[in-house]
Amino acid sequence: MKFGVVRFPGSCDDIDGLQAAARVADAVLLWHADYDLHGVDAVIVPGGFSYGDYLRAGAIARFAPVMAEVEEFAHEGGLVLGICNGFQVLCEAGLLPGALLPNVSLRFIFRQVDVEVVHSEGPFTGSCDVGEHLSIPVKHTTGRYYAPEEQLDRLEAAGQVLLRYAPGHNPNGSLRDIAGVCNERGNVFGLMPHPEHAVDPLIGSTDGLRIFESMRAHVEQHVLA
Amino acid sequence: MSSSTSSLEERHRQLGLTDFEYSRILERLGRAPNDVELAMLSLMWSEHCGYKHSRRLLRRLPKEGRHVLMGPGENAGAVDVGGGLAVAFKVESHNHPSAVEPFQGAATGVGGILRDVFAVGARPIAVLDSLRFGEPGSSERSRYLLDRAVAGIGHYGNSIGVPTVGGEIYFEGSYEQNCLVNAMCLGLAPHDRLIRSAAAGPGNVVVLLGALTGRDGIGGASVLASAELGEGDEAKRPSVQIGDPFTEKKLLECCLELLDRELLVSLQDLGAAGLTSAASEMASKGGVGLTLDLCQIPLREPGMEPFEIMVSESQERMLCVAAPDRVGEVLGVCERWELPATTIGFVTEGDSFQVLHHGVVVADLPVSVLVDDCPLYDLEPSPPVAGLYAGSDAVLSGSESPTETLLALLRSPNIASRRAVFEQYDPIVQSRTVRRPDEADAAVLVLPDGSAIAVAIDGNGRRVACDPRRGAAEAVYECAANLACVGAEPLGLTNCLNFGNPEKPHVAWQLVEAVEGLSEACEALGVPVVGGNVSLYNEAPTGPIFPTPVVGMVGKLPHARRPGRLGFARDGDAIALLGPFEPSSVGSELSKLQGCAPEGELPAADAGRIRVLHEGVRARVRSGAFHSAHDIAEGGVAIALAECCIAGVLGASVRLPRGLDPFGEAPGRGFIVSGPAEALAGFVVIGSVGGERLIIDGLLDVAVSDLHEAREGGLSEWV
Amino acid sequence: MRARVLVRPKAGILDPQGQAVERALPALGFEGVRNVHVGRLIELDVDDPDQIPEMCERLLTNPLIEDWEIEEAGVEEPSR
């Protein structure tokens, strides 16, 4: 199985994403200016400050040539994971519902937080248990998840909220403590916490590895089998 | 405006050159300089670029060491860390710009030091910051500076994807008018990617890459503006440099790719004095000349005059030299990274720095006059006759109970938790950070082969104010102690000397004594100085700042598996006090809270015993014999114990050696360690870990949760 | 033609920047200030101002969270 990690000008956690994915499968970088996904089985849109967060976070990156390929890949059911800035890019691209707003504190925040797994049937949290807490760091200025109330009701009813900040762990004022959502089909997932920074026991928690492992398991069972 | 001889002389004074310096220029050139040349000379001969008052003194610092790959004089120093890898590092000040505009001043300070590191071919992997402001409780301005400087550092470091892994913040009235913002950066490079800045090869091409050139930082040189620009055009001459981390990120990746592809002869970043200093220093180091054509330089503003282009401090720009047959590839790499890049000149034989504008030579100076002929002044040191510094307002009277004293210290701005600051920085991007800011006394970063490096930054202006020689030595000892706590062996040191006006004998004395103290301590520990920075003239009408040498030290661990932690780790572990620890209250945090002025003799340090002590701590942290190690610094043993309890979320029960001052200080000479009783046998065991309270027999008994609350509360009102 | 697009947070969405400014003004002695919101200004010279709404929908704003309005300054100003 092969992961592809997109690299925009200004991506910071692209190499971290690559290294994390490489712990569970093959992984390559996908250059923003190429209309080519190089046959990967899953795409990761990483964290960082693509295009300096100019205009709005993710607003310019979503129009990069590679994103046209990613959108088509997603429409065909391919797995797409958006982490932090990647989540912002996917929302701007309309591949995920809602938007990310500036943190309530108006400051950048780095913190190790607990997120609760809300649903675990899909490709991203399949190897987790419902109710399980994962310890994963957040680091962002623009991570407050927002969608209109009726849309939030629909997302929750449809099981699209996959991760919620545990009580007392919401770092940015996200509505309904939402930390990560997927699309209706369940093949595109965005989250503000950084699972790629929770894969190495030397450095901290390894709970983030579960998301990459879930993706690999899904691809092996449903795509490569 | 006429350009008669008399107004030209006035101009040299307006540009900061003394009459003596101007006459030396006339003598060396054999003629008067024109406006452009005068602007260039005034900057190259400024204290900031020329190190007029410090260069002779800095020769005292020890620079030799078996791990040294690049010593002082390059953009950054570098040490060998094994496995074919080098760590390049340096600390630099950005004090005066930060006082003007703290967000951008601090941000561009980080930007500048990052560029110094990737200019030698190293990928920046960590940033640390040493910040000093006036008292937050009484000064709204200092609160503002703190808030904005922290935001600026976070903005730049986070956006460019380099983790901020450590730092220090101090508050003293003496910094009220002159805040200090010192930024340190470390970078990693394979040995064969390290590059020097010496231009070489007459006929080789000079390329400018990065941001467009505007009027940033022109400031004082604007007296040379031509007459057409009148009063209302002040807005067109901004002194504040604005940083753009997104452009710097592209610049960083582009430069490292150019070096990986071996396309460059040399590389230099543009910092203070912009193109003038970058180009002339490249030429000087290479013993060559340069010709530049200003019309090739991409400008952000229309109608910039030649002197403006030459002294502009627009950020995020680098200069490189490439062979003519490689220039096309160089420009191609820059284009791929979406960075402007232009050939702006070429290397020549001889000593001439020539600048062309629309085909006309607008400046033609010998490189040696720009770079080498700047006069060096001897300092005329003389100890101050009376105390230079007043005491702070007393917060404690001395009649408080030990518990009240402990809590007051924990709450005090110099000791309280910095969590609200660290949470604004990303400490983990690049996935190397094994120890985060609050987990241990030094940051630890894992290297590709599984070994690790450690880094810490330290200084204490108050103690240096008491006794510059011993106080400066203590900064070195404390930094080395921080490294020992994580099991790291020091490899090299960088320093920033932040002092007042060196033309005043008592400041000169502080400087000479401090450099002597730094040198003695470095020699005693065997740690070479690989580079650094000097910031002088940090004075207000009320007097100079505390003399503040800031030391950054890099060390090595054989593996990253078990770097030390500062918090108590296990219920039942024994606790030992390692020394010889002979504290005094002179220059201590408690003396400050009691309103004492920084005066008195600091305790002497036995360098040989300190070295043995540090080696012992290092060895036992590495072996795992010590489960935790924390050096005793501000607030003495009592605070160190409290910090270990808070970090470990574990209580302790101890009895201190008879007569030991619980709040006295002796930086770098005492440790609180914990571990299994059998591992600590042979040391001065003072108690054990356990329970939920810190109990110091006969002194105090406080819940760890109360300690935590006092410490958390200290700065959080203001950050 | 020189145009200005004013972008503001959609009504009803929490605007902490606006709130921070609203809190800071009285501290400086300015009373009677309410309902502060912080947005963005985008200025551009365009050949065809009829294209601006589509530019707003597709790039310049995020319609989920932002409202926008166009001001046309009329005369093309020299670029600065």
Image (cartoon, coloured by chain):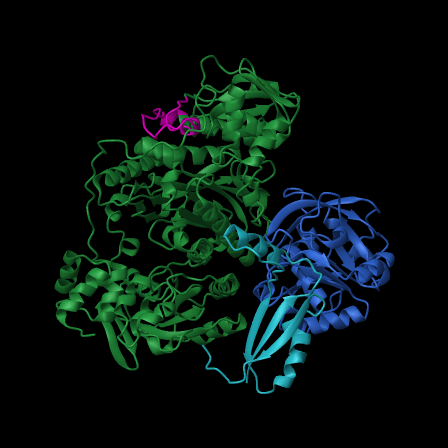
In the image, the chain rendered in green is B
Look at chain A in the picture and name its colour: blue
User: Does the magenta run of residues contain A172?
Assistant: no
Q: Residue furthest bottom?
A: C47
Q: Quadrant of residue A100?
A: bottom right
On the picture, is A52 further left or further right than B7? right
Which residue is more in the foreground, B699 or B522?
A: B699
In the image, residue B671 sits, relative to residue C8, either above or below, namely above
Residue B311 in the image, given as x and y percentages of width and height: 32, 66
At x 36%, y 40%, the residue is B174
At x 48%, y 82%, the residue is C77
Which residue is more in the foreground, A112 or B397?
A: B397
In the image, the chain rendered in cyan is C
Q: Quadrant of residue B161?
A: bottom right
Residue B456 in the image, given as x and y percentages of width and height: 47, 40
At x 34%, y 38%, the residue is B546
On the picture, is A153 further left or further right than B52? right
| Residue numbers of the magenta segment | B583-609
On the picture, is A17 further left or further right than B158? right
Quadrant of the image for the N terminus of chain B?
bottom left
